[in-house]
Image (tube, helix red, strand yellow):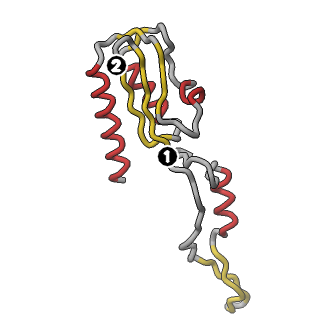
Amino acid sequence: MKLTALVIIGLLLAIGVAAFAADFPVTVSAIAVEGNDKISTHDILAVVKFHPGDEITAADLKKASQAIYDLGWFSEVVPSVEDGGKVIFRVKENPVVKKIEISGNDYRESYGLFGVTLFRYPIVSKDKIRSILRDNGVKIGKILKNNS
């Protein structure tokens, strides 16, 4: 919880610093994304509502940064506006899932007959947990999406 709060505060500070670095409104000359490796620039820019030639305000820049962050693929999105109106979104991708290990699945439900326990089975099986993770896009070799 504290880490999430720190990330949000850092994001807001970064947006504030970027906003003060430029005199708004700014006419956008180009839009770029830096720091993405697994997620395509096209997919990132699909959520940005302005294009080169548009005049934007600090609020527009903040909304675009939040939209990129809300995709769930990034732990950090820092916008900046260079002289000449080039908008750059510097992103930090979430980690790639290297291994899925399920442990601590100790809660078991007893099944019995006439008060005699026949067997105990985990309330949620490891296969069910894996299925839930798979259905929500958590896969080995893929980026962990934080809003699944």
Q: Nearer the viewer, mark 2 or mark 1?
A: 1
How many marks do you count on the picture? 2
Q: Which residue type does callout 1 highlight? A: Asn
Residue 22, numbered circle: none
Instruction: Give the residue displayed 66% in from the left and 68% down from the top.
Output: 126
Q: Quadrant of residue 28?
A: top left
Residue 59 x %, y %: 36, 20
In the displayed structure image, the side of residue 38 where residue 85 appears, left or right: left
Q: Quadrant of residue 125?
A: bottom right
Q: Which residue is the site of mark 2?
A: 58
Q: Secondary structure at mark 1?
A: loop
Q: Residues within 10 Å of mark 1 (few under 14, many from 20)?
A: some
Q: Which residue is the site of mark 1?
A: 94
Residue 80 x %, y %: 36, 24
Q: Residues within 10 Å of mark 2 (few under 14, many from 20)?
A: some
- CB atoms at circles 2 and 1 under 8 Å apart? no
Instruction: Give the residue displayed 56% in from the left and 29% down from the top.
Output: 41
Residue 4 x %, y %: 37, 48
Task: Give 33 or 131, whichever is nearer the viewer.
Answer: 33
Task: Give 61 or 110, whichever is nearer the viewer.
Answer: 61
